[in-house]
Image (cartoon, grey):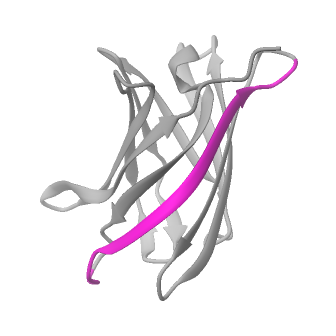
Amino acid sequence: MDFLIGEGTGKGTLYPPDHDPILFSGHLNIAREACERFVRMEFYGVLPDYGIESIHALITFCKKINAYRMWNFATSQEDALVMTGNFEGDSLVLVSEPTEMIWGLQRMRSRFTPIDEGGIQYFAELWTIDGYVPYCEVNYFFRPANVY
């Protein structure tokens, strides 16, 4: 999961169900916890017409189920979004349990893919009766770490 580690900004598009797309920018910081067991993600952004969105998440590998787990806490959701998944090629793909979101009960699939320039592409989809549809896409470009 080392490709996830970094800090940077990105511009993206949110495709809320039954609403027009929303262009947004955000700041993402991803670091390993001191214990090295968890990767901590922190996102902060402003969504026009919706306000501030803050997300705090932890990702770890669970040996018991041989998969990655993510617990995602967001200002727009009362309950945590719990996701499970594994790598598909270079991408970490996680799928949530059905969770009550601002847009109603949803199941989400998220994909984290490394970008050659340094950073990650985040692509999320919501499940519908016709299959998954785009929900959010954004590229975060990480700035080089300071070395002292």
> Residue at 46% of width from left, 51% of height from top?
10
Q: Is residue 99 visible to us here?
A: yes
The image quadrant where one finds the N terminus is top right
* Residue 103 place in picture, x, y as percent: 43, 77
* Residue 66 place in picture, x, y as percent: 53, 13
Q: Answer above or below: position of 110 versus 93.
A: below
Residue 61: in magenta span: no
Dividing the picture into quarters, in which one does residue 145 lie?
top right
Q: Nearer the viewer, residue 86 or 27?
A: 27
> Residue at 37% of width from left, 25% of height from top?
117
Q: Answer above or below: position of 47 versus 88.
A: below
Question: Which residue appears farthest toward the bottom when viewing the image?
Answer: 49
Q: Is residue 1 visible to us here?
A: no
How many numbered dots are placed on residues in this image?
Answer: 0
Q: Answer above or below: position of 74 versus 96.
A: below
* Residue 108 place in picture, x, y as percent: 39, 52
Question: Which residue appears farthest toward the front when viewing the image?
Answer: 148
Q: Nearer the viewer, residue 101 or 28?
A: 28
Residue 33: in magenta span: yes
Dividing the picture into quarters, in which one does residue 58 lie?
top right
> Residue at 43% of width from left, 33% of height from top?
120
| Residue segment shown in magenta | 18-34
Name the magenta segment's main secondary structure: strand
Determine whether, in the image, residue 62 is placed left or right of residue 47: right
The image quadrant where one finds the C terminus is top right
* Residue 22 place in picture, x, y as percent: 35, 75
> Residue at 54% of width from left, 58% of height from top?
26
Q: Answer above or below: position of 110 versus 50.
A: above
Determine whether, in the image, residue 102 is placed left or right of residue 106: right
